[in-house]
């Protein structure tokens, strides 16, 4: 068996920054350090930080008064900041700067009097944070836009979740543009999402199966699996080697491996080890050299 390793894969700059924030707070302030929502969508990363004293909560009200709380990389609605203030919490926001950019765009277009549409997945943490910034309407990237009661002359601004499928989003945007020809459209899908999907497109022609390493609740991991499937290659999303089913590999000589933006490389290595391939071929992709500054409290 031969393994083809997609590149780029794994951690993006926003995830590195968010993990660094928790790591630095643990070292600087000592445990416990509260984290609102999983700092990034990967159970391996979360449990590693929890072993060192991070406590993940879903609701700000679970954080004891006066404590330090870190907000996750996905971004948070203003309500969470108000609640934190009421509890006298010190907030360090580990939101990815590329998500903040979407929040700022939403505020700008709202101020200009435009109706804001967000293409994204209902219930995802990033969507909750973005939807809280100003009044806006959510459009699923796979569904027909249900915008029938709006006038087609309406001034509309279209934003997107950062971790969507590039292909599906283009279709959703076309549907919106058909209805609102004057819509201002921002492409907010981030560089890491785009590069990882492009790399799977490149790899798909060489492999019989794609294994995406990452968590089930990771949006960008799910999109990588869908890209593989859309190209006719069986694709599976797994946390690690223990989730590989032997029957997937029957008759498969060329196994493609990639990982989402929140997946540590150690999990990719453990999957490769478990497959014991005769050869591992790295498919060269776009070089990424993006880095983000830490929040000002930690600089
Ligand atoms: S996937 Fe993109 S938006 Fe999300 S944390 Fe990484 S760089 Fe930021």
Image (cartoon, rainbow, N blue to C red):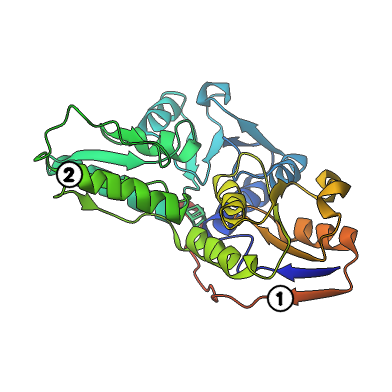
Q: Quadrant of residue 285?
A: bottom right
- Observer-nearest residue: 223 or 269? 223
Q: Position of residue 125 (x, y in %)?
A: 49, 36
Quick one: 151 or 130, which is closer to the camera? 151
What is the quadrant of the N terminus in the image? bottom right
Q: Is residue 89 visible to the viewer in this orientation of the structure?
A: yes
Distance from Cα at disc 2 to Cα at disc 1: 44 Å
Provide residue 44's location: percent of width, then percent of height. Answer: 74, 46
In percent of width and height, residue 168 lies at 43, 49
Element class at badge 1: strand
Q: For residue 69, which numbered disc appears in the image?
A: none
SS type, badge 2: loop
Residue 298 image point, x, y percent: 52, 55
From the viewer's perspective, tell me whether residue 214 is left or right of residue 71: right
**Residue occupying image coordinates x 40% and y 33%:** 81
Residue beneath label 1, please?
282
- Single out the residue that lies furthest toward the top: 61
Q: Name the residue under label 2.
A: 180
């Amino acid at each position: 068996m031969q393994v083809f390793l997609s590149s780029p894969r794994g951690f993006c700059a926003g995830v590195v920054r968010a993990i660094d924030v928790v790591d630095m707070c643990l070292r600087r302030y000592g445990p416990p350090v509260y984290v609102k929502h999983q700092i990034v969508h990967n159970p391996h990363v979360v449990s590693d930080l929890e072993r060192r004293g991070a406590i993940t909560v879903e609701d700000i009200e679970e954080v004891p008064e006066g404590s330090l709380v870190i907000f996750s990389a996905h971004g948070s609605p203003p309500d969470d900041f108000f609640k934190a203030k009421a509890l006298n919490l010190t907030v360090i926001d580990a939101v990815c700067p590329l998500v903040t950019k979407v929040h700022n765009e939403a505020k700008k277009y709202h101020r200009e009097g435009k109706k804001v549409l967000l293409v994204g997945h209902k219930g995802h943490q990033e969507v909750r944070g973005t939807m809280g910034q100003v009044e806006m309407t959510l459009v699923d990237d796979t569904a027909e836009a249900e915008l029938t009661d709006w006038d087609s002359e309406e001034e509309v601004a279209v934003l997107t979740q950062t971790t969507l499928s590039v292909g599906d989003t283009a279709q959703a945007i076309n549907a919106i543009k058909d209805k609102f020809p004057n819509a201002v459209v921002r492409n907010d899908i981030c560089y890491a999402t785009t590069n990882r999907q492009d790399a799977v497109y490149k790899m798909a022609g060489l492999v019989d199966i794609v294994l995406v390493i990452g968590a089930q609740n990771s949006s960008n991991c799910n999109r990588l699996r869908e890209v593989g499937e859309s190209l006719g290659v069986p694709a599976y999303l797994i946390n690690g080697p223990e989730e590989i089913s032997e029957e997937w590999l029957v008759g498969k000589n060329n196994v493609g491996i990639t990982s989402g933006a929140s997946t540590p490389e150690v999990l990719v290595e453990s999957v490769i080890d478990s497959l014991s391939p005769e050869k591992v071929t790295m498919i060269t992709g776009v070089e990424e050299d993006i880095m983000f500054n830490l929040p000002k409290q930690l600089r």
